[in-house]
Image: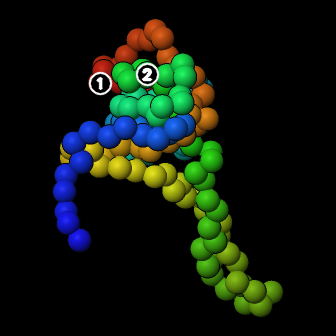
Amino acid sequence: MEHFKIKKVRPMFTAVITTARTYVGDVKTQGGLFDPTKMEGDLNIFQTVVAVGTTVSGVKEGDIIKVNYKRYAKTQHVPGAKDESQNKVMDKMSIVYEIPMIDIDGQECLLLQNNDIEYVITEYEADESGLIQ
């Protein structure tokens, strides 16, 4: 198989390629508690559009968007400890996200669909890291 480095892409139809920024630190809710869905290293819900498919409207390269990752959530059962008193294994359920990714010129990017975009951000203020959190 021939190996090559992808430098630029044009997604098909309703596909949208975005950055794959992650949270820099744990995010707190308005009440001061940590939000378990926005922890350091997890994908940020705000991404920048890198490329758009030919039938995508209302979104262009460079737009900052809010992504809904719900479609990519998969439940998985993890075997737990055996409860001897009830003679059963107590499974634990966890949620993993299987999001298609593509490497473009050494940068990991997300390969999403236009219906994964909740909205385009037209005006914002960034935090000290320069990112929307």
Instruction: Report whether residue 40 is seen.
Output: no
Which residue is pictured at 49% across the width and 22% down the height? Answer: 59
Q: At which x and y percent is residue 113?
A: 54, 40
The percent coordinates of residue 46 (x first, y second) are: 46, 29
Based on the displayed image, in which of its 4 quarters is residue 7 positioned? top left
**Residue plotted at (58% across, 51% down):** 72
Residue 112 shows up from this direction: yes
Residue 42 quadrant? top left
Label 2 secondary element: loop
Q: Is residue 70 above or below residue 118?
A: below
Q: How many residues crowd around disc 2 within 10 Å: few (fewer than 14), some, or many (20 or more)? A: some
Specify the amino acid type for callout 1.
Answer: Ser
Compared with residue 102, is residue 35 higher up or lower down, i.e. above or below?
above
Q: In the orientation shown, which residue stands out farthest toward the right?
A: 86
The residue singled out by tag 2 in the image is 60
Q: Depth check: 13 or 89 in front?
A: 13
Q: Residue at x 70, y 84 (%)?
A: 89
Type of the residue with mark 2:
Lys
Look at mark 1 in the image and give the residue it sits on. Answer: 129
SS under mark 1 = loop
Quadrant containing the N terminus in the rendered view: bottom left
> In front here: 51 or 132?
51
> Sequence order check: which comes first, mark 1 or mark 2?
2
> Picture coordinates of residue 25 (x, y %)?
37, 37
